[in-house]
Amino acid sequence: MPSTETPERGVRPLGPPRSPVTLHAVARTAGVSPATASRALNGTTRVREDLRARVLAAADELGYIPNAHAQALASSSNNTVGVICHDVSDPYFAAISSGVMRAAAEHELLVMLASTFREPDREIAYVSMLRAQRARAILLIASGIEDRSWERSLDSELTAYQNSGGRVAVVSRHRSLRVDTVLPENRAGATALARALLGLGHREFAVLTGPARLTTVSDRLAGFRAGLAEAGIRLPRHRVITGAFTRDGGHDAAVQLLRHGDRPSCVFAVTDVMAVGALAAFREHGLRVPEDISLAGFDDIPLVRELTPPLTTVALPLTAMGHSAIALALRAERGRRSRVERVAGEVVLRASTAPPAPGG
Amino acid sequence: MPSTETPERGVRPLGPPRSPVTLHAVARTAGVSPATASRALNGTTRVREDLRARVLAAADELGYIPNAHAQALASSSNNTVGVICHDVSDPYFAAISSGVMRAAAEHELLVMLASTFREPDREIAYVSMLRAQRARAILLIASGIEDRSWERSLDSELTAYQNSGGRVAVVSRHRSLRVDTVLPENRAGATALARALLGLGHREFAVLTGPARLTTVSDRLAGFRAGLAEAGIRLPRHRVITGAFTRDGGHDAAVQLLRHGDRPSCVFAVTDVMAVGALAAFREHGLRVPEDISLAGFDDIPLVRELTPPLTTVALPLTAMGHSAIALALRAERGRRSRVERVAGEVVLRASTAPPAPGG
DNA sequence: CTGAAAGCGCTTACAG
DNA sequence: CTGAAAGCGCTTACAG
């Protein structure tokens, strides 16, 4: 009898939103006080077994869901952490956040995610919003910018936050912030990479770099330079090309390098993401990697293994770093110095680098 | 005089956490009532200009940050949306979430992100947590699972949430949920892909597929089958290999296909992520793509353009879909049917597919 | 336009 | 162990 069929599917119930069941209601149907109901539900205090059972039954029957805001307000507790990144679709962040999410789940934390879209001011605004949310911790996953006034604003936000009991941890960021830090050894990693590339026989290098104010960039560049210097090799100014800190930035920087008609035998892109763009650019210009030109990156984001050729890089344990950041932030030790957890990078030679061609 | 230098850097102030400044404090130093302070800060009502200025000055001076929990509780408003996904490091999700974050920023919403790690029960648990947070909307970005009892639980959570005024939107998910949906035309897209591949001259196909219970999988598989059927071609059972819905799942499925000694001329992986794994597997087995075997995926995640060869796929506007999901959820229309926004996929032929080798 | 007061939904000393 | 009461920090009718 199709005529009696209720057209429920796809139709939302009418009427005003039913307001959620409160603790009060649960207590009443269980015949106890709200205090007892609260204690039974939270297990904070012993509650007579039969009362406990009645409360639980009532809660279940009424479909009670506690109001987290009321809980946070009353108990001034909170199980939220904030994470601020530049761009959620960047594979570098994706890898780190994977570890963050895992750690958050382990600690039964909810994650509030904010994306700055690479606008520094948004970062400060988000810290402020997360402060308003009384987030238990804030994670900054984004290379810092060396801008005096911006840095000051951020620092004052963070300090105020910390003074009220908030925890802050940053990943891969300027050490000037007085916060717990997971710090990749960018300098050492880049130096090691330089040595490895020198070991392959390269002498003519170029670097595709990001905005100089990004501390990650300057550290890696300096480290690479230092490695070359050990072999008495200098990096001429025209072989350090700056691009945006993105795939397209790497592409454009590579194009610019080639436009000079210049052909170093080996190119180091300061991040894998930029290297991906560079690889595409080389290919578009008919250059074979590594036969015509070697290419190396930094980070070891998962996708570089899928490239042809797979990319030589300095591998960072990105997921573990994300995990560490939360762990660090949660392992509070009042009055302690801010801690720095250094993370070593490991040079991984893959097929994108080879000894320079004899003719090169 | 180095001895007078304060060792501030890296040292956190001592003493107990200073409790944050309250509205009350701001009101008092401004010499007005909390009500007026609230109104001045929020701009909800006209406030005499001089009072307003005093309040703002006081707030600024004291470094006032409102307590979002108190605001949420008092006004029963809330500017948070929840997003539930399987895996934050999956490029498919990354692309979608990019649009989600953009839309969230536009609406001044904070995003609570939850990752299920592909455990269905976690999804239900997170919906419940987001209900407790009184999130304004919940987005489910994850292919649904066809499991009767699980589906029922999820549905009842979501219905209860919606009844209390919450909004739900899902991306790419089973239509059985009574929620707003952004739905890629998986079936039609796969059919169009089949036609295109047939157009290249292929007659021998295999499909690398994910868990059959995932609706996305069954739709794409069915659509592909339908497209082949138009040309009178059937897909033999042994040429439909099931793997996990991941890069490695695609890899393993491809290995399994090759183990049969079977060489279809063209392989369709139901997602790009799986295709990435398949490409690697083919390469490991010495097969050239597309010379020895053609390969196509679905989704057009950004990285497939970086592969060698770049992958033929059915392009979905992933970022726009994420954006739409929020827009849909926020565009409330009470009592309306749940809306479905269909999104067409577009076949993009790239170098990973070519006419079959004459010998094939 | 402004303020006193009630109330949002919980938790937690404080007494029993 | 249990309950009445106060309080968390705001917002918002309700009177002026």
Image (cartoon, coloured by chain):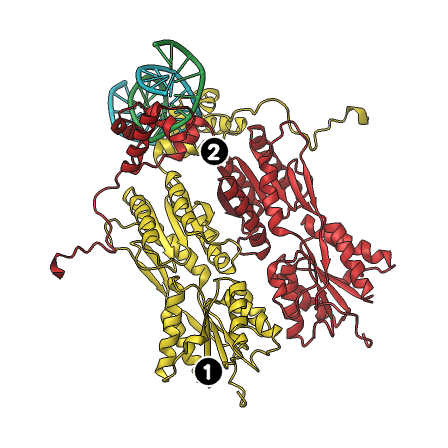
Chain colours: A red, B yellow, C green, D cyan
Question: What residue is disc 1 on?
Answer: B204
| Tag 2–tag 1 contact (CB < 8 Å) | no
- The percent position of residue B356, horizontal first and vertical second, equals 51, 85
SS type, badge 2: loop
When the figure is inspected, residue A167 is found, relative to residue B193, above or below; the finding is above
Label ID, residue B279:
none
Q: Label 2 marks which chain's residue?
A: A
In screen coordinates, is A347 left or right of B357?
right
When the figure is inspected, residue A355 is found, relative to residue B246, above or below; the finding is below
Q: Residue at x 43, y 80 (%)?
A: B196
When the figure is inspected, residue B24 is found, relative to residue A264, above or below; the finding is above
- The percent position of residue B146, horizontal first and vertical second, equals 35, 59
Q: Residue furthest right?
A: A232
Residue type, mark 1 in image: Glu
Residue type, mark 2 in image: Asn
Q: Label 1 marks which chain's residue?
A: B
SS type, badge 1: loop
Image quarter where the N terminus of chain A lies is bottom left
Crowd tier of the residue under label 2, counting other residues whose Cα lies within 10 Å: few below 14, some 14–19, many 20 or above? some
* Residue B128 seen anywhere in this rendered image of the structure: yes
- The percent position of residue B29, horizontal first and vertical second, equals 48, 21
In screen coordinates, is A56 left or right of B314?
left
Label ID, residue A78:
2
C-alpha distance separating marks 2 and 1: 58 Å
When the figure is inspected, residue B80 is found, relative to residue B102, above or below; the finding is above
Image quarter where the C terminus of chain A lies is bottom right
In the image, A105 versus B130, the foreground residue is A105
In screen coordinates, is B85 left or right of B157?
right
Crowd tier of the residue under label 1, counting other residues whose Cα lies within 10 Å: few below 14, some 14–19, many 20 or above? some
